Image (spheres, rainbow, N blue to C red):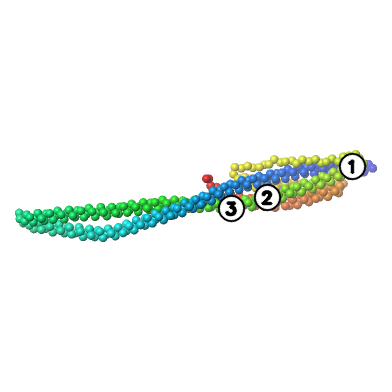
Amino acid sequence: MKFALCALLLSLARAGDIGEKLAAETAADDAASENAKCWCKDLQETLASRAREAEFELRHLDNQKSKGDTDNNVLRLEVAAHQAEASQHQQSLDSNAAIANKTQLSYEEGKAFHETALKSVRKAMDALPDGKGGDVRGALRGLEQSFAKKLDEVKDKQGSKLAGLREAKAEMLRLAREAEGEKTRRLADGVRAVEQASIQYDRFTAQSDADRALNSAMQSRCTTLSSEAVERKRLRQQAIMAVSQAKVNVAEAAAAKASSKLVLFSSAASKSSRILAEDDGDALVALMARSSEVQGEMAKMLSAVVLDAHLLDSRSGVDAAVKAALAKLGQEAGTNLRSLPHLFDAVRAAGGKSSEADRMLVRPSF
């Protein structure tokens, strides 16, 4: 009788130990799950912030490209117009040069004629005897003065006419080419600006695509972590109920007045170590690094649950229903532990692609 009473008391003590261990596991599980939940929330907020920024940048770059294309098309038309104008002036200069050659020939002929006439007149004057032929000499002097005056007029007129035409056309040609050069430089700058905006647009698009893939992986994995935590809580509640029932059974078997005590537990909410970085790219890198800490805490907690279930299963004197409940909890924790690396590796792989897209992106300052 005494031996039986001792066995009952030992069973009660073991049930109490198991209840305390389950309460401790509950607190640890809640803390690890809450930390994972906070990490998921921080990652989701960071991705949402990056998505808003990328959307703004893409709209701005698209407008910049459209305006740049329009301005460049206008400049192309203006460059073509200046080129056509310069070509016309060049053709006019070439034509004027040909005309000038003909005019020059005519001028040379006229000049030669007047010079020959002057020589003839002067020769005739020199041939007159001194003191004779006064009327003839006067007439010859008149002819000499007339031919000399006309020769000077031909020279002055020809020089000013040719010089004026060449200078005017050359100035118009210079202005046209100067305008063409300025517009060409502006066009080259505009084309480079549009090309740079296109590169930035493609890089922001790549970043957005990578972030969407990361967000999808994160949502899936975080949902899995949450559902697994709920399932472990349910199985642990069953184990706690089994422990309570075992206490009742032991107490009834001992015919002692005892009231089953519910195992109270409270969830220990871990403080989020949320990292708020000024740049979302830095925040994303920090959150990806923090994933190892979250994974490690979850793995430590799940390993402890698996080990406790195994140790309690090997102990004698533990109620069969309690063992069965703890075995289910241990199996669930073991399954969660085995899938844990895959869950976090998938998120980190997607995060790596987002970080790679960030490295390719040169953020413009508008």
Label 1, secondary structure: give it.
Answer: helix
- The numbered mark, 2 or 1, whose residue comes first in the sequence reads 2
In this view, the residue in front, 237 or 358, is 237
Mark 1: which amino acid? Ala
Task: Please tell me which residue is depicted at 29% across the width and 60% down the height of the picture.
Answer: 98
Say what secondary structure mark 2 lies in: helix
Q: Nearer the viewer, mark 2 or mark 1?
A: 2
* 39 or 202: nearer the viewer: 202
Q: Name the residue located 84 percent from the left edge and 40 percent from the top edge.
A: 261
What is the C-alpha distance between the residues marked 3 and 1?
A: 67 Å
> Toward the viewer: 124 or 263?
124
Q: Secondary structure at mark 3?
A: helix
Label 2 with label 1: CB-CB less than 8 Å: no
Which residue is painted at 80% across and 44% down in the image?
22
In the image, residue 355 lies at what x, y percent? 61, 50
Residue 36 can be seen in this image: yes
The tag earlier along the polypeptide, 2 or 3, is 3
User: Could you tell me the amino acid type at mark 3?
Assistant: Ala
153 on left or right of 235: left
The amino acid at mark 2 is: Gln
**Mark seen at residue 133:** none
Task: Report the side of 55 relative to 305 (left or right).
Answer: left
Reading the image, the residue beneath label 1 is 251
Instruction: Name the residue beneath numbered marker 3.
Output: 206
Q: In this rendering, would 280 be left or right of 185?
A: right
Could you tell which of marks 3 and 1 lies nearer the N-terminus? 3
Residue corresponding to mark 2: 219
Residue in view at x 68 percent, y 46 percent? 40
**Alpha-carbon span between mark 2 and mark 3:** 20 Å
